[in-house]
Amino acid sequence: MATSLKIAIVGGGLAGLAAAMKIAEAGHEVDLISVVPVKRSHSVCAQGGINGAVNTKGEGDSPAKHLDDTVYGGDFLANQPPVKRMTDMAPEIIYLFDRMGVPFSRTKEGLMDFRRFGGTLHHRTAFAGASTGQQLLYALDEQVRRWEVEKKVTKYEGWEMLSLVMDDHQVCRGLIAMNLQTLELKSFAADAVIMATGGPGMVFGKSTNSQTCTGSAVAACYQQGARYANGEFIQVHPTSIPGEDKLRLMSESARGEGGRVWVPRDPQDARKPKDIPDGERWYFLEEKYPAYGNLVPRDIATREIFQVCLEGHGVGGENQVYLDLTHIPAETLTRKLGAILEIYEMFVGDDPRYVPMRIFPGVHYSMGGLWVDFEQRTNVPGLFAAGECDYSIHGANRLGANSLLSCVYGGFVAAPSAIEYAKNVERGSTETNGIYDAELKKQQALNDEIIGSEGGENQYKLHEEMGKVMTDNVTVVRYNDRLQATDDKLVELQDRFKKISINDSNLWATQAVPHARQLRNMLDLARVITLGALNRDESRGAHYKPDFPDRDDEKFMKTTVAEYSAEAPVLSYEAVDVSLVEPRKRDYSAKKKG
Amino acid sequence: MTTNAHIEKKRLDNPPATIKFKIQRREREGASAHWETFELQYRRNLNVISALMEIRKNPVTVDGKQTTPPVWDMSCLEQVCGICTMVIDGKVRQSCSALIDDLLLASNSDTVSLAPMSKFPNVRDLKVDRSKMFDHLKQVNAWIELDGSYDLGPGPHISNATAQERYDLSRCMTCGCCLEACPQYGDDNYIGPQAIAQARLFNMHPTGQNTKEERLNGLLGDDGIGNCGNAQNCIQVCPMSVPLTKAIYETNRDITVDALFGWLKK
């Protein structure tokens, strides 16, 4: 097979598997590198559904409306052409998953059922119970397993990417990955590399993300010259369940199915929630946003909940509000939301069918990521990106159920784009000119340095400090003096990182060395996020500065682009393509015009 | 407004001042195992994962001995990825959803014991290698045969009842609890409940039915479905309540029907 190309994909979630399937189907070979068995990727955590304007409910929905909702919800920071391409492709993506056997919930006629989600007035979200991400991921996992049997896909599960292999012309020729059991480093030569590693939630210590969502591999690309865009746009999900080890997501589908957010009108009211009559409850979202009510976009719901608690209206004076489903019949709840209600019951102990849930916002999703063009190409030749790790679709705020869609879309575009590139790229004498060995040695030296370091700093404590300072200052509400102080703190942590001592003398399957490498990379991403926020003096989508409360299109309807330098990220700004939907002010208190 | 009464969860009213964690340690596959005990101050809302994270930060045993940090797998922490499965107080389950209060209530003690699953190669400490389970999915062709992933319109109409039944099977997260608990499973002699249930998942789909026999063939070998001893342990431990025994029963029935009447269809 002289024409068979080799493409390496990093990450086996929805985006990575979508790309792998397309590449294998086109007859080419894939090396699939993933820190966990791909079936355990973070996509399993997505609960609510996947958007696509199939318009089976006779509501007059259309991809054009989906486009409008998405760019409007994203506060006009997304380049619109790729969003249009995605919303146009959405119905066929959903149908494809239907053909793959995803057990989507059905109507009486046997068609796929659709539910409502935030930021739209249409029933546009296909769902499989309340574990849609799990079900979509499994469908792709199954298809890719079939290609594995056909020897088109080779999986390297339990391997973590450490760096790209670049040739003398700064073209990406493959990557270096580490076996997490043996710590062996291996070079993977490839005609193209697709990054599909998801988001960087662990930068914030606790988030709704999986423990694997460190952003470490993306940070490595950034350090080697890939641009990182809109890092400051971090979605804080309005409804999460605070926990010691993580913030567990309570899906937006809880509100999509009728869940109501409220607090007692009297903050001193200590009665059980069911004993508080309707008139003494403050349904603050419904009151302020009569058209969208509890289904305003996430950034708005998050700020409102945050503000209500800040002003002392939280339940029991604490940082929590009620998310109430108890007015809906228990049987309906079990059928439509069973999986997420079980999560709540499992971790909190109360049954949300009978007792209102207590929730609070939690870091959830990064709208920012690797800069890509409209064909998912990064600025590094040979390097592509798809899914949460690229910045391209969601602008300043992501709408619920658009993430699963954008992951699959990104994978489906990155795959042919990478194939096209790989077909035409000049193949240097890469194997012989030593670039792989050189990069291997460099990465081994980094490992040796970490293993040999004896300064006494504890890596897990450094991680906690980073998470705390980021969560306190770079999430819902942002002030410039605190952002500057945060960056100073991050620089201090980078300095202290040089003095860590790993506390594991047994290097077999150790988690200390991989974690140390992730931490080092996360600190770089944390600075990109923080400085991006510091330099954006406006409020837009998830980025909110009380000192600059308005959106400033003239100055900031621009993509933030960060490039690595040893001292600090170098920021520049790029115009946004708003050629399809004219920017207008976001206002969810009334029905949308236009 | 529903007013169904529901049972309030029993809570730990008199927690101990400290909790002990007895953890099985193994340096690497093939090395001998031993136990180490760690002690933490009691806090509300601890689960096994947050306790392990605390221990990992500064691994000193209850006897004051500096040791290596325990190694375990974790990812989603929402009991949906399956990776953090281990044997906790003798019962196989996910460590993320194992709440310390509940464990102490159930054991009426101040100690929690953690051991790796025993049916899989023990990589180190609490970490095991379950890649075999994914091989089992290959053996039963656990996928729908697509003509291609290009746009061919929607899939077949399916009743909500069938979709729901398939959803229940499709929630399997390949965690391995069923295999750990199954008295028949071990030494490659039996494919086990999870793969049989996944064969059933695809055999129930209108498109999947077209290739049903290939899936059933994967279950007819020496390690096949015939090894099920009907102990029904699998259904007891499945964290996702996958109807495993029903899937085994129905698949057995399919095989029998196929064997008896298969020639009629040809």
Image (tube, rainbow, N blue to C red):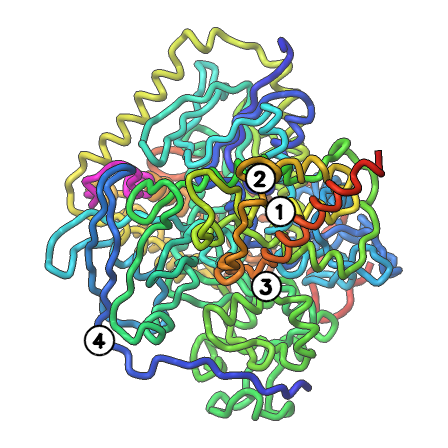
Q: Are marks 3 and 4 in contact (CB under 8 Å)?
A: no
- Badge 3 element: helix
Say above or below: A316 vs A544.
below
Q: Are marks 3 and 1 on the same chain?
A: no
Residue carrying label 1: B198
Q: Are marks 4 and 1 in contact (CB under 8 Å)?
A: no
Report x, y in % for residue A586: 69, 61
Q: Are marks 4 and 1 on the same chain?
A: yes
Q: CA distance from mark 2 to mark 1?
A: 7 Å
Q: Are marks 2 and 1 in contact (CB under 8 Å)?
A: yes
Front label number (3 vs 1):
1
Say above or below: A444 vs A515.
above
Which mark, residue B137? 2
Report x, y in % for residue B150: 77, 33
Residue at the spot x=49%, y=21% of the render? A172
Count of number-bearing discs: 4
User: Mark 2 or mark 1, which has the lower sequence index?
Assistant: 2
To which chain does the residue with label 3 belong? A
Report x, y in % for residue A410: 64, 38
Q: Specify whether residue A530 is in view.
A: no
